[in-house]
Amino acid sequence: MGTGLRLFFMSLQLFLPLSSLLASQSPIPPPKLLCHADERSALWELKATFSDNSCFDSWQREGEAQNCCSWQGVECGGPYSHVIGLDLTHCYPNRLYSSINSNSSIFRLFHLQRLKLDNIDFNYSSIPASLGNLQSLRELTLSGCKFLGLIPPSVSNLTQLVALDLSFNSFHGPILPFTTNLTQLKKLVLGNNQFTGEIPPSLGNLQSLRELDLDNCTFQGLIPPSVSNLTELVILSLSSNFFDGPIPPVISNLTRLRALVLDCNNFTGEIPPSLGNLVQLVVLDLDSNQFTGEIPSQLASLTHLQDLDLSFNRLSGPIPTSLSELRNLNSLSLGPNQLSGIVSMDMFSEMENLEQLILSLNSFSLAIESTEIHSLTTVKSLGLAQCNLNEFPKFLEKLDNLVDLDLSCNNLSGEVPVWFLNVRLPTLSYLNLSHNSLTGFPRKLFYYNTTQLDTLDLRFNKLHGSFPIPSVPIANYLVSNNMLSGVIPLLICDWVYVAVLDLSKNNFTGELPQCLGNTSVNFKMLTLHSNNFHGRIPPFGSSTSTCELEMIDLSDNRLEGPLPRSLSNCSSLSFLNLGNNWIYDTFPSWLGSLSSLSVLILRSNKFHGGIEEPKSDPGFPRLQIIDLSHNNFQRSLPSLYFQNWRYMGVSSWDIARKRSHYLSGYIFSSWVVAHGYPSYDFSMTIVNKGVEMEYGKILEYFKVVDLSSNNFTGKIPDSIATLHGLHLLNLSNNMLIGLVPPSMGTLSELEVLDLSQNELSGEIPQQLTQLNFLSYFNVSCNNLSGLIPQGQQFDSFQCNSYLGNEGLCGDPLSRKCGNLAPPLSPPNARKDEGSDAPFEIEWKAVAVGYATTFVIAVFIGHKIITERPNWFSRNFGLRQHRRRS
């Protein structure tokens, strides 16, 4: 059972007595007593504001049904049978839409004690101040209602409130004004909003609180010492904020705590040994912080613990043997960290309820020879990645309840043993054997004694021979970065359950099975790059069933012929990489109708002709990366496309404010996400600053246009200045003429600008000095003249940025401005391939590594790295650590 689910049941157990108490204070009205006419009228008006009345069938105006006290969701009570409760949660999962303002009829129900409107969509409106008029309220739940703005100060008038839940909205601002007077509160849930600042010390005045949930609210700073006044607290959850500093020692005074959840923050220092005083704890979650030092042995005093999560920190030293006393543990997660020493599996043999054990990605060695773990048969999720294992652990034969097994990043070598393939694992769903030295299987059609296997990860091994065919249907089959060879068997087309197939970076040959074009609706990701395939591309999307492909990567092969027009039927396609092949075709403007297409890479092929004007408006509306370099495109640059690439015109700051996600297409499982394998990521190679770089992940706000090394002519259109979110622009090695547009100075997020090897003339616009993030600038081999702009980023560019422009003068060139001879014509940038001319630049350097530091460090990353280093470690460090060349 996960931490979140366990907290839910704990909260339920905690507040069921509260609900009973509230109900007991309101005598049941006489069965035949009708409700008050004014309240019935108010409810009827309220019903009319909802978009769907299907869950209000019992609300009638005639006959016996007009008694609103009998309406579903309505509760009457008190000596005069007033409406004291309104609960519309029974309408879920139907989504209700409504509006609310200060004149809403709901505010005429003055006797309300309980109001629950969870998951009703109020369309980002504000909570009216009139809510403060319902001063009899004791329980108010407005979770997931799409409220926006500040919480009105009038909420502080609800001094009788015992439970308040405003979670999953878009509230912002401080929480101080509306909490000051709510001294009766026992439950305060504000999670998943956008509050600012620190937790006010005055929160310590709410001394009746038993549950405090401030998850994912962007709070920062220290936990105030006044929290020690909340001695009735049972649940304290501050997950996913920006809290920093050490855990305050006063936390250990909250001896009633059963759940302490501080994960995904920036807490530092050592884990306080005094946490051992919280002997009632059932859940202790400290993962994804910056804790250092050793695991305190005092945690062994927490004998009621069921969930202990210390993963994604920098803890060191040995695992205390005293943790073996935690015999009620259901989940134990200790990795990744820097724990060391020798760990015996015997340590966990007395944990008879253990279902999840994560020891992955530490520095210790796991002793498995003498292990007797009969009691661990309850384990469902076992993470033993990077535990210095030299062989498959034999105790796996006894774990017949396993669902998730991770043995990656160890020293496993040779063939997968027969006994392991024969182990009866009827529920195994996820198996990760990647990053080892496995060479193969004892038989071509390898057999797993399971019927549930969903994901099999064999990446980064030494598998050789022909394509290994599993005997059971597998949804996610990953065998990249091996030494497999031969052709892809036609049998693969019968895999109707496959969702992700990654055969990249092997030595496969032959033609791709054309039947791959008849993919099932389950097929999401196909990655076959860096092999030796030849022939035509399969006609993806030609099947009568719907094409659901989201990612196709066939780059670095020898594929030829035109692109199959059926690709336009793959409406979910987000990533298409066909670079470094022999494809002969014109620009695929017909792909512009794919509203999800974010990445289009056609570099180093034989595309030709001009780029036609978009036939649909807008063409490629979601495009953020386009690489058409090293082809034979001609005529003018695609001016109208620049106007239509609307997503490139969106500021990165606007995108990052809403989210900081990677382009990815498939989530394997919730367990995989929680333990460091978030998704199957899109990756690509792009020329950045003159060097080929492999991007192992792609941030959603990283935007690139590379049209270099073609035969484009004419002027650079002013419309390119509409791409305000652009980070990299490469127009080098074409035949462009005219001026450098001064409007390019408005590309405020541009980091890389390469206009070299063209026939541009005139001066370098002074407006380019406004590009504060520009770190690479190259206009060499043109016919530019005049004074080189000075100041800002231009003070950092070297002479080679300007070579081959005889008319340029000023720093950093030795040529000073004055009486200059007329500039010579620029060297011809379109030289024969065999030319040895001094100004011909042929970039061949390959820097294979994660270039996401380039994205992070300059525009959004500094904030992320400094304020959320645990997040950075989870999303960058782990994958880089696991990557092998």
Image (cartoon, rainbow, N blue to C red):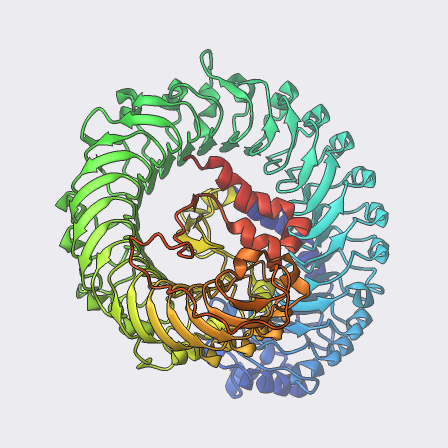
Place of residue 243 in the rendered image (x, y in percent of width and height, measured from the top left): 73, 49
Quadrant where the image shows the C terminus: top left
| Picture quadrant of residue 132 | bottom right
| 434 versus 174 height, above or below | above
In percent of the image, x 26 and y 27: which residue is there?
440
How many marks do you count on the picture?
Answer: 0
Of 736 and 746, the residue lying toward us: 736
| Picture quadrant of residue 542 | bottom left
Of 361 and 135, the residue lying toward us: 361
Place of residue 836 in the rendered image (x, y in percent of width and height, measured from the top left): 35, 52
Place of residue 400 in the rendered image (x, y in percent of width and height, measured from the top left): 37, 28
| 412 versus 864 height, above or below | above
- Residue 791 appears left or right of 718: right
Place of residue 49 in the rendered image (x, y in percent of width and height, measured from the top left): 56, 84
| 631 versus 493 height, above or below | below
- Residue 369 appears left or right of 469: right
